[in-house]
Every structure is written in structure tokens, then in C-alpha cells.
Image (spheres, rainbow, N blue to C red):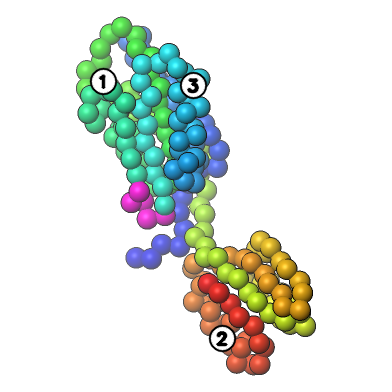
Amino acid sequence: MTKFSYLTVTHATEGLYKEKGSRFLSFCFPVANQEDIKVNLEKLRKKYYDARHHCYAWMLGSELTEYRANDDGEPNHSAGDPILGQIKSKGLTNVLIVVVRYFGGTKLGVGGLINAYRTAAEDALSKVEVIKKDLTEPVTIHYDYDQTADILRLVKEFDLPILSQDFGEQCTLCTEVKSAVRLRFSERVQLLKDTGINFSVNI
């Protein structure tokens, strides 16, 4: 089934879980790409340099197929996977969750670790604001200046954001169209061309 939108978070949040002296500080960030993930991880590693573990999981892309879980020295699948599980359970993407652990002197066992990392991630996620974002496709429209009114009517009809405009003998307008209405938009463009309006659209 074709997807036209996805769920993500609006801002960073923090959470906390304590168990037998160990503290699990959790952080949730909205991210757009691998560079965002790297920057946020480096900031936390620098700030909490004395922590034993910085475990994390992230999800990118509308198809929910690009993700990673990292145990950072904890037993395999005891940290990253429980964190990732919380992201998946809410159907979120473009999100990074990091859980920083300060060891309290008592081992929790694999089951205890799974619960601790899952609960810490859940606490950070409980404070997020989830929003639905529409998938869009970039559009560039080239037209003659005297056709500006016709083009702006098209922009208004499909509620297209004007990202940039260049006025001249040959004008250019950069925008984006929601994937959900791309077909209808293309049909409307063809209809306008059929009526004699001379312009080009690159999608």
C-alpha cells in the first residue's frame, strides 16, 4: 500500500529510570538524516563522558525500513533492541532515542536490562508531541512572466508552498506537492497546457 504520510516527533524530550542504583537517562530527538544522528550522539557522549554505556536506536524514512539498534557494550540485544521496540510500537520515524547508563554496582541481568532500557525509552517517548507529516515531491515550474496569474492560481488550488521564485523574462517557481495529490496535480497541469498556457513542470 502506498504511503502518503508518516509519524514523527516535534522536539527533543528526556526521561529517567532507576533500578538497583543504576540510572538510565533517556533522550529522544527528531532527526532528518545520519548527520543529525551523529551530532546528537556526539553531544551526549561529550556531556555524559563518565557514563558506562550510551545505547541507542533510530529509525529513518517513511517506509520504516532504515533503522539501527546499538547495545554499546551491554549484552547482545539487551539495550538497543528494546529501545528500537518502543520506536516501532508507536510507528515513529525520523527519530533517535539514546539511553545513557550510570552503573550502580549491582548487575541487573539480561532481563533486567531489557526492562530498564525499554522503560527509560518509554519515559522519554511519553513526553513527545507526535505529528503526521505529509510526503512531498519537489516541483519546479518554468513560465513566462505574463502567465504569473495562471501559475499562482495553480499554486493556490493545490496549496503549494512557494520555496523560491525568480522573476524575469522566463520565471521559475520552486515548490513541492503532496504525494497524495501528485496524480491530480499532473492532470491539472496537462489540462492547463491543453487550454494553451505554455509552461513546463519538472517533478
Q: Nearer the viewer, mark 2 or mark 1?
A: 2
Q: Is residue 59 above or below residue 45?
A: below
Q: Return the x and y of residue 71 as percentages of the image width and height.
A: 30, 28
Check whether the beta carbons of the residues at disc 2 and disc 3 lie within 8 A of each other: no
Query: In this figure, which residue is indicated by the disc labeled 2?
Result: 190
Amino acid type of the residue tagged 3 in the rendering: Lys
Query: In this figure, which residue is indicated by the disc labeled 1?
Result: 112
Secondary structure of the residue carrying tag 2 is helix
For disc 3, the neighbor class at 10 Å (few under 14, some 14 to 19, many from 20) is: few
Check whether the beta carbons of the residues at disc 2 and disc 1 lie within 8 A of each other: no
Q: Which mark is residue 46?
A: 3
Amino acid type of the residue tagged 2 in the rendering: Gln
Q: Return the x and y of residue 197 as percentages of the image width and height.
A: 67, 88
Secondary structure of the residue carrying tag 3 is helix
**Which of disc 1 and disc 3 is earlier in sequence?**
3
In the depicted view, which residue is nearer to us: 129 or 102?
102
Q: Return the x and y of residue 194 as percentages of the image width and height.
A: 60, 92
Q: Return the x and y of residue 31 as percentages of the image width and height.
A: 49, 42
Residue at 43% x, 13% y: name it. 50
Q: Which residues are magenta?
A: 62-66
Residue 126 appears in view: no
Residue at 45% x, 30% y: name it. 41
Check whether the beta carbons of the residues at disc 3 and disc 1 lie within 8 A of each other: no
Residue 30 appears in view: yes
